[in-house]
């Protein structure tokens, strides 16, 4: 769990994780601001990282989840983009 105020909303600090190259599920990494966050497992601290990893069951859900997370973080930080810019895609979509 990470406070939305600690999420770095700069899209240049986001990394998409493909569901290949040894990764079982697709997802993304989002950098955090101002230091490291605790990674817990069953309530016990495992390690500290300066990013949060989120994995999803389906690749098609990655963009939706990332867009929602960034929108929520911007709202929490009161840094929402100007009207009309909200519906822009999160990142470049490459056609295959």
Image (spheres, rainbow, N blue to C red):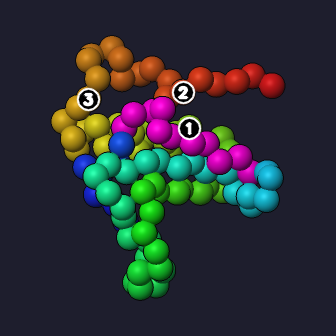
Q: Which mark is residue 91?
A: 2
Return the residue found at the far front.
35
Q: In which quarter of the image is residue 40?
A: bottom left
Asked if labels 1 and 3 touch by Cβ distance under 8 angstroms, the answer is no
Specify whether residue 12 is painted magenta. yes
**Upstream in the sequence, badge 1 or badge 2?**
1
Horizontally, is 92 left or right of 10 in the view? right
Q: Residue at x 80, y 25 (%)?
A: 96
Determine whether the residue tagged by mark 3 lies in a helix, strand or loop: loop
The answer to whether one can see residue 74 in this image is yes
How many residues crowd mark 1 within 10 Å: few (<14), some (14–19), many (20+)?
Answer: some
* Quarter of the image that includes the N terminus: bottom left
Q: Residue at x 39, y 34 (%)?
A: 10
Which residue occupies the foreground of this view, 36 or 43?
36
Residue at which label 3 appears: 80
Which residue occupies the foreground of this view, 88 or 21?
21
Determine whether the residue tagged by mark 1 lies in a helix, strand or loop: helix
- Range shown magenta: 9-19
Distance between the Cα atoms at labels 2 and 3? 16 Å
Query: Residue 35 in the image: x percent, y percent?
Result: 32, 57
Residue at which label 1 appears: 63
């Amino acid at each position: 769990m990470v406070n939305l105020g600690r999420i770095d909303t700069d899209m240049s600090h986001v990394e998409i994780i493909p569901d290949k190259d040894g990764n079982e599920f697709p997802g993304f990494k989002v950098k955090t601001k101002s230091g490291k966050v605790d990674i817990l497992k069953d309530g016990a601290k495992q390690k500290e990282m300066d990013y949060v990893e989120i994995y999803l069951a389906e690749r098609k859900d990655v963009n939706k989840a990332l867009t929602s997370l960034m929108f929520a973080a911007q709202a929490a930080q009161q840094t929402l983009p100007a009207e009309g810019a909200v519906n822009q895609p999160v990142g470049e979509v490459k056609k295959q």
